[in-house]
Image (cartoon, grey):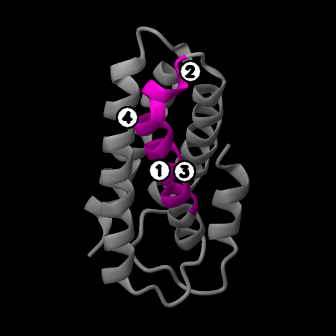
Amino acid sequence: MTHHIRAMLETHPKDLGQIDKDKLAECIAVCFECAQTCTACADACLGEDMVAELTTCIRLNLDCADICTATGRMLSRPTDWNVTLIRSVLETCRTACQACGEECARHAEMHEHCTVCAEACRRCEQACTELLATLD
């Protein structure tokens, strides 16, 4: 999944400095994957008979999807990064993924789509954490 992302980072005309390109490429890919999974989970929740009980889950799915999309897009534009802003975005993404993952985990026994979403959120949270650790 990260082949083209990695290729774009490798061919970027600017020196990206000490950034770990593998971790950056992975984080970008995982953010977009999480956004898609959260969007699909929200839609699946809307299809459930007990949709009223899933309101919080749907809201967190959609918020997380938006934040993951924005994070993936911002990470894809490394020219003249404001590292403080990038750190803040990664921390926000990590927080959104944690909240969404925890909410989906609460519904996982009844809804398999929530199990899948919780896993995607945990993976994205971890990728953000790992990339944050590499930023100066």
Q: Work out whether 85 lies above or below 124.
A: below
The residue labelled by disc 2 is 113
Dot 2: within a 10 Å radius of its alpha carbon, few (fewer than 14), some, or many (20 or more) residues? many
Q: Work out whether 83 lies above or below 102.
A: below
Counting every numbered tag in the picture gives 4
Gap in Å between the C-alphas at discs 2 and 4? 12 Å
The x, y position of residue 77, in whole percent, is 59, 77
**Regarding mark 2 in the picture, which secondary structure is present there?**
helix
- At label 3, which amino acid type do we have? Ala
Gap in Å between the C-alphas at discs 2 and 1? 15 Å
The residue labelled by disc 3 is 65
Q: Are marks 2 and 4 in contact (CB under 8 Å)?
A: no
Position of the C terminus by quadrant: bottom left
Q: Nearer the viewer, residue 77 or 68?
A: 68
Q: Residue at x 50, y 30 (%)?
A: 117
- At label 1, which amino acid type do we have? Cys
**Regarding mark 1 in the picture, which secondary structure is present there?**
helix
